[in-house]
Image (spheres, grey):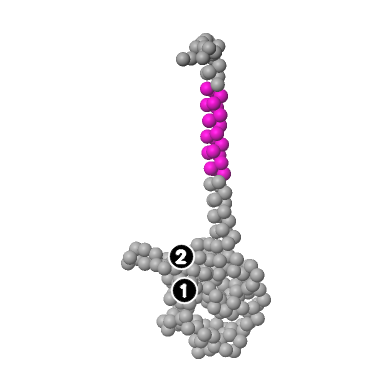
Amino acid sequence: MAGRNDEPVRVTAMTVGKMQRDAEKRNESMEGGTVWRALDFLLYLVLIVLIVFSIRTVLIDLVRVDGRSMLDTLNDGEIMLVDRTAYAFRTPTYGEIVLCYYPDDYYTSQDVKYASRVKRVVAVAGDTIETIDGEVYVNGEKIDESYLSAERIGGQYIARQTIPEGCVYVLGDNRAVSRDSRYTTVGPIPLYRVVGKVRVVVCFDKTSARYLKPRLI
C-alpha cells in the first residue's frame, strides 16, 4: 500500500523543459570528457614519440651496413646498434669499430652523399703509423689484426705519419676496397666527427628470411 505522502508525478511543459536542459548538460559533459580523453591520449603519444626520437638521436642509433668495406666483420645489409654515449667521457681506442663522418672535402671531391661511415680505429692521437711489407705498424710495432682474413689485407699502404691531437686513424677491414684514412681526402678523423661505437650487430639470413641472434662487437 502506498504511503500517505506518495503522489503521482505531474508532467508539465515546465518539467519537460527542465528534463531536456538536464539531458543537454549531461551530453555536453560527456562530450567534453571524450575530447579531453582523446587529447590526453594524443599528448601521451607525442611524449612517446619524443622519447623514442631522443633515444635515437642522443643515446643509441640503428644504422644499416651499406657496402663491403668492413668484410668479414660486418656484412652488407646488417643492422648495427651504435652507442652515441660511448665517447662522452673518453676517446676511441685501438680496435674499436666506430661510426663517423669524413671531412667535408671527401664528399665534395668524391661527389657522394654526406653519409656516415663505419670503420675500425687502428691508431690514436700521438701514435706513429706506417706499413712495412704490407703490415700495419703503430709506434714501431706490428699490430694484431687477427680479425682480418688473408684476402682482405691486399692494397694497403700507409706512409709514415703521426696522428694529430684530437684525431683517430681509421681503416676498413676489407682493405682492398675501403676508402679510409689512407686517402688524402679522408686522413685522420677529428673526434667531433666520431658519432659513436658499434655495440651490437643483427644479421639477416636471406636463406631463412629471418634475423639471426644479435652478436656483440
Q: Secondary structure at mark 1?
A: loop
Q: Left or right: where does residue 192 sit relative to residue 77?
A: right
Kindly indicate the quadrant of the structure image that contains residue 141.
bottom right
Q: Residues within 10 Å of mark 2 (few under 14, many from 20)?
A: many
Check disc 2 and give the amino acid type: Ile
Residue in view at x 45 percent, y 71 percent:
215
Check disc 1 and give the amino acid type: Met
Label 1 belongs to which residue? 70
- Residue 105 in view: no
Residue in view at x 53 percent, y 73 percent:
97
Residue 17 in magenta stretch: no
Label 2 belongs to which residue? 79
Give the residues drawn in magenta, as a range. 23-43
Residue in view at x 49 percent, y 69 percent:
200
Q: Position of residue 93 (x, y in %)?
A: 59, 77
Q: Position of residue 110 (x, y in %)?
A: 52, 67
Looking at this view, is 34 or 85 the one in front? 34
Q: Earlier in the sequence, mark 1 or mark 2?
A: 1
Residue in view at x 55 percent, y 19 percent:
21
Q: Position of residue 134 (x, y in %)?
A: 49, 86
Q: Secondary structure at mark 2?
A: strand
